[in-house]
Amino acid sequence: MAASPDLPSSPAGDAPAAKAGRKAGRHRGEGQWAMGHFTPLNANEQSKKDDDGLNVRTRIETIYAHRGFDSIDGADLRGRMRWWGLYTQRRPGIDGGRTAVLEPEELDDRYFMMRVRIDGGRLTAAQLRTIGEVSQEFARGTADLTDRQNIQYHWIRIEDVPEIWRRLEGVGLSTTEACGDVPRVILGSPVAGIAEDEIIDGTWAVEEIHERYIGSKEFSNLPRKFKTAISGSPLLDVVHEINDIAFVGVRHPEHGPGFDLWVGGGLSTNPRLGERLGAWVPLAEVPEVWAGVVGIFRDYGYRRLRHRARLKFLMADWGPARFRQVLEEEYLRRPLLDGPAPEQPAQVWRDHIGVHRQRDGRYYVGFASRVGRIDGATLTKVAELAAAHGSDRLRTTTDQKMLILDVEQDRLDSLTSGLEALGLQVRPSSFRRGTMACTGIEFCKLAIVETKARGAALIDELERRLPDFDEPIGININGCPNSCARIQTADIGLKGQLVTDANGEQVEGFQVHLGGGLGLDPGFGRKVRGLKVTAAELPDYVERVLRRFQAERAEGERFAQ
Ligand code: SF4
């Protein structure tokens, strides 16, 4: 395999590369290329240096899909295939207690998870129909809605991957850089371009960034994943605080609608909210500013230790003032305009569930499955239902939900009935609306506990026990200490781990975090010291917490306060 160049040229020309040349090899540092710290390389950095992740596509198409799973090179299997949205899924039957002690190859199934990136959550009916058909034909019907607006398949065979790409790409979808140390899917407001209260429509920027940079080798070797969010909705509906970069709609007092720039957010271990750089960015400059920030991450990001490689660690050391200075001086070569902060959203729910008027007089309809679990047959029917009601546009949300746009008023009742017949609720309970779950032990190799089925069962149980509970509540369930389902930002965050039950047995359970939130009250939930619940106790515990809240809250108090 061809070795990739040590340092790609920066968007601003030669500034970091020149520094690298001057300082290369002096001392180890944190692995920042721009400081000349190229060695030593950890295994991930070595793999990326050996060959660009994007290059694995050719090997999949010409070798692996023909010769089968056993022909796949180990570094491709556990590394580079992510650049095309492919991870091996967890081998069935391995309990959570063995997750941390088995070698990666012992956890690997011979099937893959495949993530379809849906930038801005934007789908046509034809695209959704294709996603559903691929699911039924190649993924045993699986198709989970993720909390980053993607759709995720399971049970994918390597032999079928080229045909799946052909079908998806035939309708303008892709799995390019859906995983890996690259710019992942770009989150966008699900109501961009249609909402009555929109400050600015960021759709052009989402599409332009995708067009210019996704799949480009300029940014195909970053220190770690890079997450983007763009929304001009006053509801702040793309969890902007926990992305590596976010553009948030604001009105500048002199220049009008544009975006407030946030950098350095992220969850998982060492969670950190993004910080404002105090800069106002007009729509036309969003792609250039985005590329500047990604360039800083590529050149100055920490690569020595994998667990310190997200942009948030660089931001923690630099702070927003220095970050902005480097962005302006080395990458943009011009100053940015100062700008205002976004206003607090006027409501807690930001998921667009229910029936809402668009600014063109038509309506959009937001609906909920349980914890994003849906299936290919249902998605195909949703696509057909949308088309039968005059809509060709659908959206995914950052809350594992979906929207159908452009519905005439006289078709709303029929559409709502059709969705409800598919088990998709337009007026869900607070529990169905506010509960999310990550992939969990069913398919994820890092998982310690089951999440999806448990989350769905918890919703059913809470609906039965607390039928009148109608407060906004977020219950997020993770299968391990990572934070794919954003536990730190939930009212009730549940982190999967093994716990000791009353009989002294190690069983599946959760560490409880209470009182996190974004938007109105951004902050991370507090780990409740020593509070761990077994999975079996979970409905009782959540019911107790919610009943106590109902009984003791002050007038107007929300759960997170
Ligand atoms: Fe897997 Fe853990 Fe992420 Fe859940 S939180 S999907 S268990 S890595």
Image: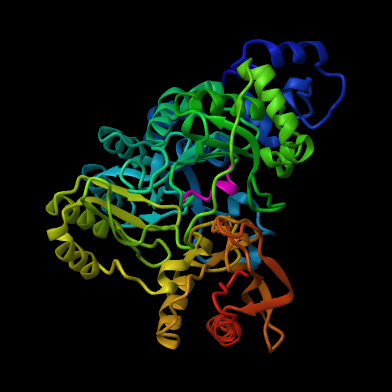
Q: Is residue 373 magenta?
A: no
Residue 453 location, x and y as percent?
45, 71
385 to 342, vertically: above or below: below
Q: Position of residue 542 (x, y in %)?
A: 56, 80
| Magenta region, residue range | 237-243
Q: Is residue 530 above or below residue 384?
A: below
- Which residue corresponds to the image point at 76% horizontal and 11% vertical from the top-left? 21
Camera-side residue: 15 or 273? Answer: 273
**Residue at 35% of width from left, 64% of height from top?**
368
Give residue 438's position: percent from left, percent from top. 51, 60
Image quadrant holding the N terminus, namely: top right
| 263 w.r.t. 233: above or below | above
Which residue of the protein is positioned furthest toward the right in this rendering? 27
Left or right of residue 362: residue 335: right
Residue occupying image coordinates x 56% and y 31%: 280
Question: Residue 140 versus residue 294: which sits nearer the camera?
Answer: 294
Residue at x-position 64% and y-position 35%: 278
